[in-house]
């Protein structure tokens, strides 16, 4: 089984407010450092994204990819790679847990496998950078109430 990287952050907002930002793919270029373009290709019956095309620039990894999304209730979304130029696989998830104080603990889990040879240690470091930037950007975006 592939090793994964995860991290958590507390955001001063209700889970529904956090998930609303996560689900708004068109705005990803506004708050994520790596996503330069985002386009929803397919939606489910509830109007949530099922397939999203992302143009990424994460330094060492520049890619045009399509991800498939699965929504589990109101507080969890996971994704898996459908198509990519640079990646062999990409699996991730956001899990939201209300803290009881009006804030939300957000855990981001990510596993990436690139087509080019890369040491596991370097790959996990890149995963950690991507996760930490995404969580910081998500926190800033949600708490700004934009």
Image: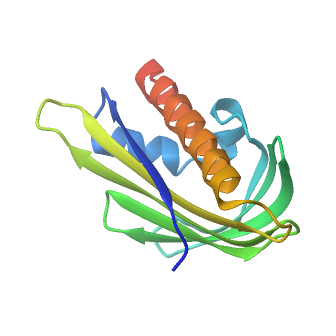
The x and y percentages for residue 11 are 34, 30
Whether 65 is drawn above or below 58: the answer is below
The x and y percentages for residue 136 are 51, 29
View extreme (top): residue: 144
Q: How many marks?
A: 0
Q: In the displayed structure, does residue 48 sit left or right of residue 59?
A: left
Whether 34 is drawn above or below 13: the answer is below
Q: Which residue: 20% across, 43% down? A: 98
Residue 31, quarter of picture = top right
Looking at the image, which is closer to me, 39 or 8?
A: 8
Whether 17 is drawn above or below 96: the answer is above
The x and y percentages for residue 134 are 57, 39
Q: In the displayed structure, does residue 49 sit left or right of residue 66?
A: left
Q: In the displayed structure, does residue 16 sit left or right of residue 67?
A: left
Q: Which residue: 53% across, 74% down? A: 44
The colour scheme applied to this rendered structure is: rainbow
Looking at the image, which is closer to me, 52 or 65?
A: 65
View extreme (left): residue: 100
Looking at the image, which is closer to me, 2 or 121?
A: 121
Residue 111, quarter of picture = bottom right
Q: Which residue: 68% across, 46% down? A: 26
Q: Which residue: 44% across, 62% down? A: 77
Whether 80 is drawn above or below 98: the answer is below
The x and y percentages for residue 50 are 59, 71
């Amino acid at each position: 089984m592939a090793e994964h990287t995860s991290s958590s952050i507390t955001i001063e907002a209700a889970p529904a407010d956090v998930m609303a930002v996560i689900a708004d793919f068109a705005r990803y270029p506004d708050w994520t450092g790596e996503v330069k373009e985002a386009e929803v290709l397919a939606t489910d019956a509830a109007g949530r994204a099922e397939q999203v095309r992302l143009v990424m620039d994460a330094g060492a990894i520049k890619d045009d990819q399509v991800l498939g999304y699965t929504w589990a209730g109101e507080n969890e979304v996971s994704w898996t790679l459908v198509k990519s130029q640079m990646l062999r696989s990409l699996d991730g998830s956001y899990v939201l847990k209300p803290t009881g104080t009006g804030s939300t603990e957000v855990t981001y889990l990510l596993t990436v496998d690139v087509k080019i040879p890369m040491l596991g240690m370097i790959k996990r470091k890149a995963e950690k950078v991507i996760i930490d930037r995404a969580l910081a950007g998500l926190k800033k975006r949600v708490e700004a109430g934009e």
